[in-house]
Amino acid sequence: MFRYYLKLGVLSIRANPALSALMVAAIAIGIGACMSIVTVRHVMSGNPVAHKNDVLFHVQLDNWNPDSPYEEPNEPPEQMTYLDATALHQAGRAFRQTISFKSDRVVQPDGDDARPFQEEVRATTSDFFAMFDVPFQYGGGWDAAADQTEERVVVLSSEMNERLFGGEDSVGRMMTMNKEPYRVAGVLAEWMPMPKYYDLNNNPYEGPEDIYAPFSLAVTGQWGSAGNNSCWKPLDGGTFEDYLASECIWMQMWVELSDASERSTYLQFLDDYVEQQKALGRFPRDLNNRLSTPAEWMVNREVVDDEVNVLLSLAVLFLLVCLLNTIGLLLAKVMRRTSDISLRRALGASKSALFAQYIVEAGMIGVAGGLAGIGMTWLGLRGLENVFSEYDFIAYLMKMDWSMVMLAVALAIVSALGAALYPTWRACSVSPATTLRIQ
Amino acid sequence: MEIGPIWRAMLKNKAGFVLIALQIAVTMTIMVNAFAIMQERSNKAGRESGLDEANTFAFASALFADYEYEQRQALIDADLALLRGLPGVRNAVASNSFPLRQGGWSQGLQLQPGNAGTDAVGTAIYFVDEHGADTFAATIIDGKNFAPNQVSWKVEDDNTWPAYGIMTEALAKEMFPDETGSVVGKIVYIDENDPVNIIGVIDRLQAPWQGWSGVERSLLVPQRRTSEFQRYIVRTEPGYRDELMPQVEELLSKSNTDRIIRDMTTMDQVRKLAYLGDTAMVKILSFVVILLTIITGLGIVGLASFNVSRRTRQIGIRRALGATKPAIVRYFMVENFIVSSIGLVAGGILSIALNIAMVEAFALEPLAWYVIPLAMIALWIVGQAAVAGPAKRASNITPAIATRSI
């Protein structure tokens, strides 16, 4: 019977090609508009470390101005001072702990013709790679000892390795930054966490840095921060040491706990640390320390732009218009066939048979709309990519994965069936033979 | 007019008309709100930065060798002398940032020294020498520019601020809202305790962050800084920009190989990047509105065609009974006008409701009242245009149809 209904559906669709095309197009465009925005939002709000979400925590301490919070309402600062970051790292109370900041260095490739270029370098501690599951192609990170000994090592991204060493296994080779030599300890495999959850300052979508160097080395070398820096209190003097000793915030700290249940224990440790600092005259505000999972942290930092939410609400309304359009057209189609239906009812067709027939027909339009909708979504994403082409990270945001493709088809079928319900019900409620009499 | 019979005929097929009215209502809701956002964004992207944008470019010099303080001073002096001496260059300055760059230095200014808590007025800081105002194309509307002896090099390990400053008019208004006379000669405090004498006021120079509510507030500070990373801003005579840029890059790269010249960019590019989100939003929404209008228009055409073919016999009977062709056309036009009007009234209410919700949720600006009648007129026209074709076809139905049975 189903095959017969399919055949009837095809016949009916072919009887009104322009109209059927309009319905399919309306669904496809509605789905396309909706799914392009949903896809962008999906990537933007993705959690690249979802598998570790219950054991990774971003650490915040409230060392801010006693008279005004860092952000209303009473948000602790989003970054940490050098004093606290190093003290907490030194204490080593978590399973793994990472402190880091972003800096700029000038890379000087070998060869007389090669022009030096400036690169962002992440100054971090040895746990960074294991903690964030950073994949390696060659070698590995530096060991914990290098965090203290200021060993001159670096880890390169595969892109940087390609640029400096032509992509070969460069572990043990030397490179130059700011006229100083560094030994390559490891080369990363492709790694593009979207968003860059471990440091959401500046731009969360620009992708990770291409060079990693030991934190201790960066501090002794007096590398400045290339990220955000905020101070609430004048510095005691103008030297780098004064800056390190200040209440200025410029580093990010993350911890990995061995178990999610450790969260309260670690928070207690933070509170004890701050109490101890209070005794030394620091931390003038009330206790306000915080641990956030990557997911919590991304919501707190609002990585999904309001812009996307505005577009999403308009896109949903857009889909609604497309569906109203389809309902209207399906209804008109049914109304024109009232005499047909009436005749079939008079000849003994049951309501459920009619219902099945018309819902199959609508389902076919829905599937066609869904498939075309995937194409439309792809077009929509290319359009968005084009409009934002000045952003060099944009291609990473405009990627459809299988879950989005499935969602597009599901949304199209649900939409089409939803749209078909009322017209189909109207068709079923045509009483037998009434319209025959009029004719 | 035969509104009475048309209305009663419509009541026989309520569902179809309710659907089309709803579609028009939601279309209008999207249209109005999209238009309100587009208007806000294009106004924002159209604001002036204060710079002579067409004739200004900027670049950075990053030093990567260990230079002594004096060596760094000498390099900056040499760079500026070279730049200012080039034919076609009107003026040049080394500063920490420039408008629309999206990164810079902000500081609180207060009227009284000491820890004033939240009373400080935030402002962007531009460290410049006496060439700053002219390079930034700022007109001094009160007081005067820095004298060369008021400009000083930042002494390492000394965090005190220079004693002079030039502020934008917007900053002056924010700090001294009740002052009707001149603010020149007044003192404000920076970094809690350092006094700054206001010696001049400039008309306009935006802060580097275009999204900040205080974007018009800037302070020129007569201090030169010797950091390894320097930003140079160059204002050229009209028409010289494009030939000077490669020339400058070449000259400076060669003049000292312990540094790299990077981020060479015109102010046009900087503006494009700074407002990319806003201009993109305008493009996306215009596309959405156009697409939506087409879909709704086609929907009306489809429904009207259906109605025409469903009523072929009735139309034939009317024609046979003496209705003229224009009378048939008018029937469909009036019918569409009634449905549109109902939809548009509902759309007006929905538009305002959605706008209130969006203003609440996303801190958008409320829409201007005239957008609503404008959208209504536009959609009325779309409706009438869409129904015109099927109506014309209806009027071509011959009266003889009435004599046939289907």
Image: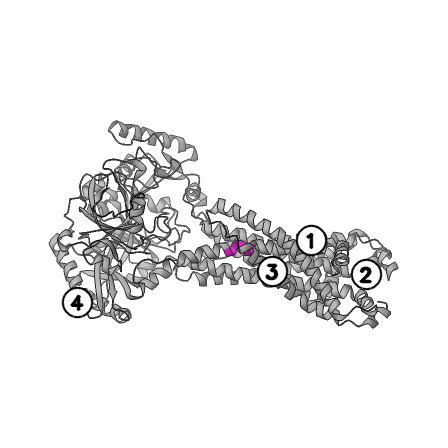
Which sits earlier in the primary sequence, circle 1 or circle 4? 1
Residue located beneath label 3 in the image: B379
Residue located beneath label 2 in the image: A340
Distance (Cα) linking label 4 and label 3:
61 Å
| Protein chain holding label 4 | B
Distance (Cα) linking label 4 and label 2:
90 Å
Distance (Cα) linking label 1 and label 3:
16 Å
Q: Amino acid at mark 2?
A: Asp
Say few, some or many: other residues with alpha carbon within 10 Å of mark 3 (under 14 / 14 to 19 / 20 or more).
many
**Pointer 1 with pointer 4, Cβ within 8 A:** no
**Pointer 4 with pointer 3, Cβ within 8 A:** no
The reply to whether the magenta stretch includes residue B146 is: no
Residue located beneath label 1 in the image: B18
Mark 1 vs mark 3, foreground winner is: 3
At x 86%, y 60%, the residue is A438
**Pointer 2 with pointer 3, Cβ within 8 A:** no
Mark 1 vs mark 2, foreground winner is: 1
Question: Can marks 2 and 3 be said to lie on one chain?
Answer: no
Asked if one can make out residue A168 in the rendered structure from this viewpoint, the answer is: no
Q: Is residue A384 rendered to the left or right of residue A222?
A: right
